[in-house]
Amino acid sequence: MELRFNNTSVDQILATFDLWVEEQPRTIEGHHSIDESGVDIHVVIHTQWLSYADDLYIHIECNGDDAVVWLHSSSRFGISDLGVNPDRILDLRTSLISVQHAGTPCS
């Protein structure tokens, strides 16, 4: 899923994402990678049922003054995730777009 935030900095998106991660039970944050192309984050979230590991990836980069965010969540094991990963992406999307970001050009 791709999201675009007008006049929003990478730091503002990261702050909102970090708050969302803190609210998630059974989350083990993987790593942040920051370079000239943007920020890549990998987080492992264990499901409530049987504690299966799901991978959540987020990429944030600047496009002019806007922050562009790509979200992806997938199960490591099994055939079906019973809708957990699409629901997780929608929940994170809702959190990101519900925050009133200050008018700070992307950097």
Image (cartoon, rainbow, N blue to C red):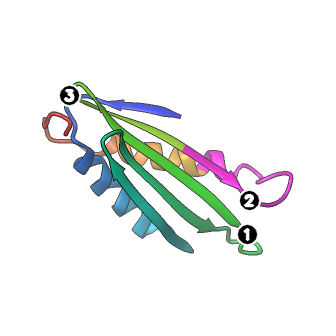
Determine whether, in the image, residue 104 is placed left or right of residue 15.
left
Mark 1: which amino acid? Tyr
**Upstream in sequence: badge 1 or badge 3:** 1
Mark 3: which amino acid? Asp
- Residue 87, given in percent of the width and then of the height, sits at 61, 48
Residue in the picture at 77% in, 75% down:
50
**Residue under pointer 2:** 76
Label 2 CA crowd tier, 10 Å (few <14, some 14–19, many 20+): few
- Residue 3, given in percent of the width and then of the height, sits at 42, 32
Asked if residue 30 is positioned above or below residue 93 in the image, the reply reads below
Label 1 CA crowd tier, 10 Å (few <14, some 14–19, many 20+): some
Mark 2: which amino acid? Arg
Does residue 11 appear in the picture of this structure?
A: yes
**What label does residue 65 carry, if any?**
3
Q: Are marks 2 and 1 in contact (CB under 8 Å)?
A: yes
Q: Quadrant of residue 63?
A: top left
Q: Are marks 1 and 3 in contact (CB under 8 Å)?
A: no
**Residue under pointer 1:** 52
Does the magenta segment cover residue 77? yes
Mark pair 2, 1: CA separation: 8 Å
Q: Secondary structure at mark 1?
A: loop
Q: Secondary structure at mark 3?
A: loop
**Upstream in sequence: badge 2 or badge 3:** 3
Determine whether, in the image, residue 53 is placed left or right of residue 27.
right
Q: Quadrant of the image for the C terminus?
A: top left
Residue in the picture at 84% in, 58% down:
78
Mark pair 1, 3: CA separation: 39 Å
Q: Quadrant of residue 100?
A: top left
> What is the magenta range?
72-87
- Residue 14, given in percent of the width and then of the height, sits at 31, 53
Asked if residue 31 is positioned above or below residue 79 in the image, the reply reads below
